[in-house]
Image (tube, rainbow, N blue to C red):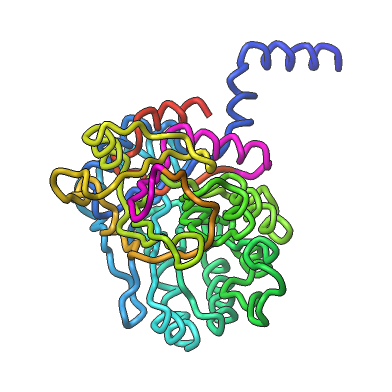
Amino acid sequence: MKGKIWLLLFVLMAATPNLAAAASKLEVSGWVPYWRAATGTQDTLPNLSALTTVHPFGYSVKNDGMLADTAKLTEEPWVLFLAEAKKKKVRVIPTVMWSDAAAMHRILSNQKTRIALEDEITALVMQNNFDGIDLDFEGKWAETKPYFSTFLKGLYQRMGKKWVYCTIESRTPLDSRYDGTPPADATVYANDYVEINKYCDRVQIMTYDQGAIDVKLNRARAAPYVPVADPGWVEKVITLAAKTIPKKKLILGIPTYGYEYSVKPLSQYGYSYDRLWAFNPRYATDLAKELNIPPVRNGAGELSFMYKEATVKKKRKPDKSESITQGGLAPAATLYSQAALAAQFEPPFNIVWWSDAQAIKDKMDLAKKLGVRGVAIFKLDGSQAPGFWEVVVKR
């Protein structure tokens, strides 16, 4: 009898090889931003089956601690999009985004307002039959850490079988972040990984916007070097997180955008990198074509090219279809020393650096290598690089 059962199981497995393949696939989540709802939903709709989770991005928290439907999810194009996601059994888990550090501390440190927010988020999920909620509370103060943990505990208890996703900032190992002895406050963090592990079903690490954070890689890579996400750095961040949070919960963040910087020499050696703006890939490819400059695969496995601003016929910056500054990515400056650039390309000059389909595939391959649960794409707005969906489907 046992032999017949094993034979039957063998026949069933042989007849359905896609089941084993599906089980080994990475979970893929992606944020569809409110500022490009029409193009984001339109582009993602025919590719829903390639995703595990969609994050409408989303809800925000008002100054009084109550939610605002920033994306207007009760209106089109969201209504049709979310209904189709449900049909295809794709998790619908909206994001609650919050970046006001002072307001976060005030609301979460007060028991009454903290509980009110826990109750409102729970009611939102239950009333709309969402599969869960994604919390993207960025830029918290270190003193807010225990209150955020208490908030997570209360929300997790209320959510029952619904999913709680936590999207948190990357944490670079100290020996890669600092030269020599780290400062005394180097390990004062705003996120408690132990508590996050207890009360989050998925932990999505924002492994992007690397810039100059990894001083070891800054020295090791050829200049200029100002990556969105170098796989070498991403691996360090995920390996560190995995010491506290099991890999079965960890989600590796992947960017679909880039940055342009003005690069200037320092007084003695090295360069300063002044961030001008964030952009979508079309801006970079159009500019490269205009300048007749072929982009190169750089040391971070992403694409980049340099140009002298004077060579551009008309000064331009990303338009609304190319820029992602509406999403709150503010300009920033980074500064560090690097090996000298080639003599034929004297500064000042601009460098354009972005994540294309190959860079995205590399991050997916890295996620498989590291054995984490999956990847999270920021962002799905119809402006990803050519070949993006092919990479996701074939994962």
Looking at the image, can residue 164 be seen? Answer: no
Q: Is 372 a magenta residue? A: yes
Residue displayed at 57% across by 78% down: 145
Q: How many marks?
A: 0
- Image spot of residue 255 (x, y percent): 44, 47
Looking at the image, can residue 146 be seen? Answer: yes
Name the quadrant of the N terminus: top right
In the depicted view, which residue is nearer to us: 188 or 298? Answer: 298
- Image spot of residue 157 (x, y percent): 57, 68
Residue displayed at 81% across by 11% down: 4
Instruction: Report the residue that reaches farthest toward the right.
Output: 2
Q: Which residues are magenta?
A: 344-373
Res. 12 image quadrant: top right
Does residue 306 sit above or below 214 in this rendering?
Answer: above
- Image spot of residue 242 (x, y percent): 70, 55
Does residue 223 sit above or below 287 in this rendering?
Answer: below
- Image spot of residue 139 (x, y percent): 46, 72
Q: Quick check: 6 left or right of 119? A: right
Residue displayed at 69% across by 53% down: 239
Q: Quick check: 55 left or right of 15? A: left
Res. 25 image quadrant: top right
